[in-house]
């Protein structure tokens, strides 16, 4: 049985029952797969789970592999759980541009619920160019900063 079949089997389990820690751990591990389809299916399954997947996804934001951090940031931005706000703010300082971009997307999805952690980080880490750029992206998502031509 290949990786994509294992992922499809887990998707069926997720749809039929509550997410258990073993399933979540397996899906988090799949975020490191070399197969894009496996990573995508795992991320989508974690997003479907919502709240139970948030804490493991926050941990995955610290993974040494950029691809895992990217997938975790993407999933957290889609789940839009306020509990992820501090981790998404930390991810604005990630060395990977894509991770930083998705962290900003996640904060945008949180709206005002992401502001306090973001403002606190800007005060504490005002020297971080990446953090300031991410904060600017969050603020300038509106047409005021990017007017239509």
Image: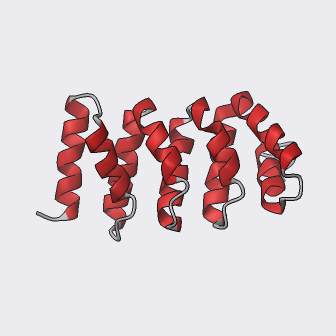
Residue 56, position as x, y percentages in the image: 44, 44
Q: Residue furthest front?
A: 124
Image quadrant of residue 119?
top right
Q: Residue furthest left?
A: 1
Viewer-nearest residue: 7 or 90: 90
As drawn, is 21 to the left or to the right of 97?
left
Viewer-nearest residue: 16 or 123: 123
Which quadrant holds the N terminus?
bottom left
Image quadrant of residue 132?
bottom right
Q: Residue at x 50, y 37 (%)?
A: 79
Residue 131, position as x, y percentages in the image: 79, 54
Residue 83, above or below 122: above
Q: Residue at x 83, y 59 (%)?
A: 128
Viewer-nearest residue: 7 or 69: 69
Q: Residue at x 17, y 47 (%)?
A: 9
Q: Residue furthest bottom?
A: 34
Residue 95, above or below 72: below
Residue 17, position as x, y percentages in the image: 22, 28
Q: Residue at x 40, y 50 (%)?
A: 43
As drawn, is 58 to the left or to the right of 17?
right
Q: Is residue 146 visible?
A: no
């Amino acid at each position: 049985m290949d990786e994509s079949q294992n992922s499809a089997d887990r998707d069926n389990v997720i749809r039929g029952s509550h997410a258990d820690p073993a399933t979540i751990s397996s899906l988090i591990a799949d975020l490191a797969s070399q197969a894009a389809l496996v990573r995508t299916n795992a991320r989508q399954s974690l997003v479907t789970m919502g709240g139970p997947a948030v804490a493991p996804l926050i941990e995955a934001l610290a993974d040494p592999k950029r691809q895992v951090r990217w997938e975790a940031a993407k999933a957290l931005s889609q789940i839009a759980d306020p509990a992820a706000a501090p981790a998404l703010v930390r991810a604005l300082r990630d060395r990977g541009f894509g991770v930083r971009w998705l962290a900003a997307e996640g904060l945008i999805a949180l709206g005002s619920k992401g502001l306090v952690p973001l403002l606190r980080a800007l005060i504490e880490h005002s020297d971080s160019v990446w953090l300031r750029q991410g904060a600017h992206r969050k603020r300038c998502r509106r047409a005021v900063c990017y007017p239509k031509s």
